[in-house]
Amino acid sequence: MTEPKDYLAGVGSDIAKSQKRVLFVTRRTSTKVKVRDEEQVQTFPEALLRIAVAVELLVVALICASLLFDAPLEGIADPADTPNPAKAPWYFLGLQEMLHYFPPIVAGILIPALLVLALVVIPYFNVNIEAEGLFLTNRRRRLNIFYIASLGLSLFLLFFKVYVALVPTLIVAAFMLIAASSSLDSAKRYRRYLASKPASWWIMTWFLFELIVLTVVGTFFRGPGWSWVLPWKG
Amino acid sequence: MSDNRLGENKSTPSRAGQQISRRKLFAKLGMASLGAAATGTMALTYRFLSPSVLYEPSPIVNAGKSESYPLDSVTLDVNSAIYLIHVQEGFFSLHAVCTHLGCMTVWKPELDVITCPCHGSQFSREGQKLDGPAPKPLPWLKSWIDDEGDIVVDRSTVIQPFQFLRI
Amino acid sequence: MARGTDSYFDKLQRTRAWRSVFRSGSGYSTLHRALAIQQNVFLHLFSTKVRRRMLTFRATWYLGALTLGTFFILVVTGILLMLYFHPSVPQAYADMKDLKFVVSSGMFLRNLHRWSAHAMVFLVFAHMFKVFYRGAYRPPREFNWVIGVILLLIALLLSYTGYLLPWDQLAFWAITVGSNIASAVPVFGGKVSFLLLGGHQVNANALLRFYVLHCVILPLAAALLIAVHMWRIRKDGGLYVRQSEPRIEPSAGTLRDSQPDDAVVKV
């Protein structure tokens, strides 16, 4: 299928005629997104009361949790006595898991900095705004790039024996292959769904998956000396 | 201008014996439960804000044996701010802080008065105000003899004057 | 007006005293409701109208509002807890014990603070992912996304600085590990760590600095950025409404952009 043109409108150039305004509409980045008037309602009461109910439910849930579960308090801080394992708060456990494999400057500084940078620049790249399915155009070329990237990442992780990160990567790569072999006309609904997802979606989903897996591993599957333990065994 | 209350046109006012609309009932129940929650929260907050334990010295002062205080003596303990006074009728204790603005008073034996150096208030040996801007007499403090025979004073409890501790 | 059926509250609302405070008056008309938002210094961060589509639970899962809710809980419980906390060593630990055994509702408030903190970190991440998957970072909302990322970092820092305050083994060693990582930054890692801890070790200076960061500096920064974040939502045209996501209707072979979405969009 030929590549659609980048613009959709043109005009004849007869200068003798009165000037006409010309609008070039580029593919998928049109600023004219209002196709019809949206129905609007009053902030108060519609929005504010809904928010109030949601927050109230949250407060009730948190109060119940506070009445039932106590926050932990261990012995007084003792610089001479390091507990084993010394675990960071749960939202940093993913990072601490990475520390197990890479030197602190990589796992502690480089990776978080790159992550934050990657997050910040997301909206500034056109490819994230256009949001077309990853393999729907230039399929062959993109598939090749995908093979190289995923293979490279997997080998890198394998080389450093980061199995906890390797497994989610392979799982996501498998789903991407399914997407590559589907299209918007596929029979099964999940195939159509996967085929429609853009590159940014795949990368973010991979990130989310890794985050969950690394945090769960760091919380439940790591014991003294950061050794691998199975949480259901004593 | 018509009242825009939606859906309430059909309800009659909630006088006793009259019907009340469902909306009004739930509104009242909701406000009542919010009120109950708010009251409970305020009560618990007040309890939270009042410390249960104070890092201050105990108001109970052990003044030692009665023999340390000869007859007609007025002894000031600066640390606990009390006078231990032994008269004919017995022992009693006065709070040594001037009732005017909180300065520490002193006993002047040559004048037989307790004076305050800040603004010149003067009190008698029994704590009665003699002169000066102080509004009230020096309070008498509760005292008793404990099991070991010591005189004990409770600085936080004020008693009526002229109640002597007799040994 | 049916004056005979007015409640006492209605009568109160017509007094001069009440109307001097709530100047836009009370009522149920659209005008009154709009004024209730627009005339209020706190509420006029919102616009007076919102799009109906964004009110549904499916749209946002109310995650932004819930995150803000946990922030309020944390501020209130935090202030109350500050009344019984001396940020010195070893008094801080003794105060934690006091909160548990001596202070009325002390343990409850501490628990509420802790679980709200965990909830807030979780909700901030969830909010970020939901915004991404909704596509609400696209122009003109790019900078609001950046502000959101900064707020995420502030939330994590708030959690991190608060973690040290109980001064127990968990706190001490978690922060020690963290500051060792920070000092691994080349060139100025050591200096940053020195400034953060007020020394070379995690000790009384560190506790005090983390306390000030946790209670003053970071909450102020968060409050300011939250205000900007919400202001920008409004200036960017309100919460994002999905209009041009590709649809998975089988009839589509290519993507459309100039065709009205009503034909293929299911709201």
Image (spheres, coloured by chain):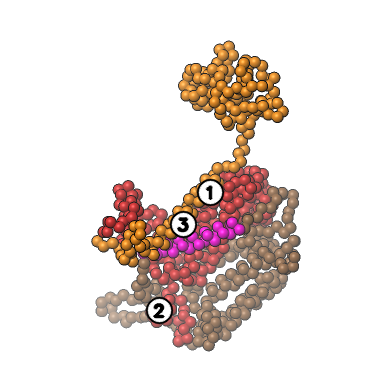
Chain colours: A brown, B orange, C red
Give yes or no for contact between labels 3 and 2 (Cβ–Cβ under 8 Å).
Answer: no
Name the residue nearer the viewer: B79 or A143: B79
Find disc 3 in the rendering and name its residue.
B33
Give yes or no for contact between labels 3 and 1 (Cβ–Cβ under 8 Å).
Answer: no
Type of the residue with mark 2: Asp
Q: Is residue C165 left or right of residue B120?
A: right
Q: Quadrant of the C terminus of chain A?
A: bottom right
Local secondary structure at mark 1: helix
Q: Residue at x 57, y 48 (%)?
A: C81
Residue A10 lies in what quarter of the image? bottom left
| A57 inside magenta stretch | yes
In the rendered view, would you say C192 is above or below C30? above
Give me the chain letter of mark 2. Answer: C
Q: Which residues are magenta?
A: A42-68
Residue C87 position within the rendered picture, expressed as x and y whole percent measured from the top left: 61, 45
The mark found on residue C261 in the picture is: 2
In the rendered view, would you say A110 is above or below C41? below
Type of the residue with mark 1: Leu
Name the residue nearer the viewer: A19 or B38: B38
Residue A33 position within the rendered picture, expressed as x and y whole percent measured from the top left: 39, 73
